Amino acid sequence: MKKILVFGSVNMDHVYYVDKLPNKGQCILSKSFNTFCGGKGANQAIAISRLNGNVEMVAMVGADDNGEKAIENLKANNVKTSNVEINHKIPTGVANIIVDDNGDNILIVNVGANFAFTKNDINKYKKLIDDYDIVVSQLEISLDFIEELLKYASLAQKIVILNPGPALKIKDEILKYCDFIIPNESELAILIGEKYSEDLEVIKTYAKSLQLISKKNIIVTLGDKGSIFVDINNNISIIDAYKIKCVDATAAGDTFIGGFVLKLALDVNIKEAILFATAASALTVQKKGAQVSIPNYKDVEEFIKKQGKVNIHE
């Protein structure tokens, strides 16, 4: 199995459950409230680990209770943490999440120590990157650092995977350092400088445009609409979603990436990896919370055996 290195964010999630997401200026009451360990990077690392991957995380937390809890949680999930740094000046990142009865959500993130990485910090991690096969990152840490990370990992001939969330416009030349770019539909629109659309035909056009810019594999996650895969030859496939009741969509995308990366580490072909990732994320949305909802490998295999694989439309 290939070794996986995740660079990313660590947050503490404050989750509010409501009947309906609020309108602008509206004050609403939550039905319940929970605190969970989160952050896109930590979610993805834990998803990979729970699915039996060999994974280490590089991150930064504050010297506070949230940071201590986050590190202990990573360790409890068998994620290597020797390169999770503690920043004594900036607190651990915090996310406020509102989840409605349909499982849809709104997120507001205070990045905290996640953005303390600097451009020059890449020099501290070059030897570490050299020792791994797959490098995964998101955009919840400093963009200057991420650009250097993607560039070095590509030149070191690693498999480079970017989940461009939260949505930011990044340089086209940086995208070319990635082997796989995995946005959702809103992140996709921002990446190529277009207007957000929920129309599948428009999203397909956007995905093909991103592939032509990057010359790499594109996978667009679409929630209950499934996903789109555009390969390096600009061929497009549509992958269905499972028809299940969504309780909480938090970490669904992170679990998808975790499942996909795990299968890449096992040298499974891309479409089979997407099918596995689709099943893993379907299990995640049936439970509340971020990391607590992420399934293990056996759960996913049993789910696929019971439900079957979703269809791929070429």
Image: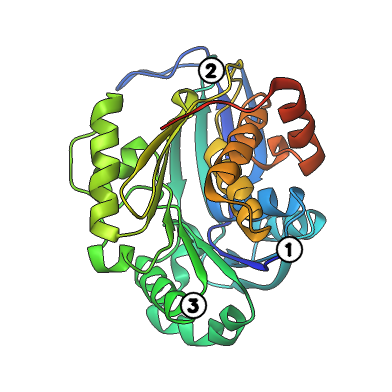
Q: Is residue 192 left or right of residue 271?
A: left
- Can residue 253 be seen here? The reply is yes
Quick one: label 3 or label 2, which is nearer the N terminus? Answer: 2
How far is mark 1 from mark 2, CA to CA?
37 Å
How far is mark 3 from mark 2, CA to CA?
46 Å
Q: Residue at x 59, y 43 (%)?
A: 272
Q: Nearer the viewer, residue 284 or 262?
A: 262
Residue 56 coordinates in the image, percent (x, y): 68, 67
Q: Residue at x 58, y 73 (%)?
A: 88
Q: For the residue marked with disc 3, what is the amino acid?
A: Gln
Q: Quadrant of the N terminus?
A: bottom right
- For the residues labelled 3 and 2, say whether their Cβ atoms are less than 8 Å apart: no
Q: Residues within 10 Å of mark 2 (few under 14, many from 20)?
A: many
- For the residues labelled 1 and 2, say whether their Cβ atoms are less than 8 Å apart: no
Q: Residues within 10 Å of mark 3 (few under 14, many from 20)?
A: few
6 above or below 235? below
Mark linked to residue 54: 1
**Tag 2 residue:** 18
94 above or below 236? below
Q: Nearer the viewer, residue 180 or 191?
A: 180
Q: Residue at x 18, y 41 (%)?
A: 194
Q: Quadrant of residue 76?
A: bottom right
- For the residues labelled 3 and 1, say whether their Cβ atoms are less than 8 Å apart: no
Mark linked to residue 157: 3
How far is mark 3 from mark 1, CA to CA?
19 Å
Quick one: label 3 or label 1, which is nearer the N terminus? Answer: 1
Q: Quadrant of residue 290?
A: top right
Q: For the residue marked with disc 2, what is the amino acid?
A: Val
Q: Is residue 25 left or right of residue 76?
A: left
Q: Residues within 10 Å of mark 1 (few under 14, many from 20)?
A: many
Q: Nearer the viewer, residue 194 or 95?
A: 194
Residue 224 coordinates in the image, percent (x, y): 49, 23
